[in-house]
Image: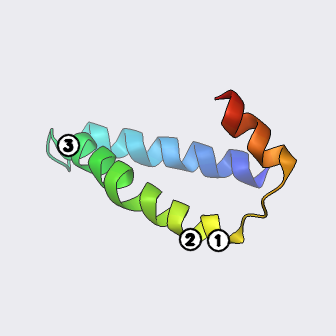
Amino acid sequence: MENFSLIIVAIIIGYALQKFKIFSHETPIILNQYIIYISLPAIILLQVPKLTISIDIIIPAIIA
């Protein structure tokens, strides 16, 4: 239930930011580029050393 309320709060905040036009028109493009080029590689670099190599991980990688 806590996750559901967090999603509702995020939607309300997003709606309010869109309604009051606080950010420029290019903000979604900039945020998407930040996530793709900075956040995702950082998460991958943090999580890859924690992986244990097993057959369960190798099979989906080979199939893809």
* Above or below: residue 54 compared with residue 15: below
Dot in front, 1 or 3: 1
In-front residue for pair 53/8:
53
Which residue is denoted by mark 1 in the rendering? 49
- Examine the image and state in which quarter residue 2 appears: bottom right
What mark, if any, has residue 21 been given in the picture? 3
Which colour assignment does the render follow?
Answer: rainbow
- Residue at position x 59%, y 43% in the image: 8
The first of marks 1 and 3 along the sequence is 3
**x and y percentages locating residue 46 in the rendered image:** 56, 71
Q: What element carries label 1?
A: helix
* In contact (CB < 8 Å): disc 1 and disc 2: yes
18 sits left or right of 44 in the view: left
Q: Which amino acid does label 3 sit on?
A: Lys
33 sits left or right of 40 in the view: left
In-front residue for pair 6/32:
32
**x and y percentages locating residue 43 in the rendered image:** 52, 63
- Residue at position x 23%, y 41% in the image: 29
Q: Which amino acid does label 1 sit on?
A: Pro
Query: Residues under labels 1 and 2: Cα distance?
Result: 7 Å
Dot in front, 2 or 3: 2
- Residue at position x 71%, y 51% in the image: 3
Query: Residues under labels 1 and 3: Cα distance?
Result: 42 Å
Q: Which amino acid does label 2 sit on?
A: Leu
**x and y percentages locating residue 52 in the rendered image:** 79, 64
Label 3 neighbour load within 10 Å: few <14, some 14-19, many 20+: few
Which residue is denoted by mark 2 in the rendering? 46
Label 2 neighbour load within 10 Å: few <14, some 14-19, many 20+: few
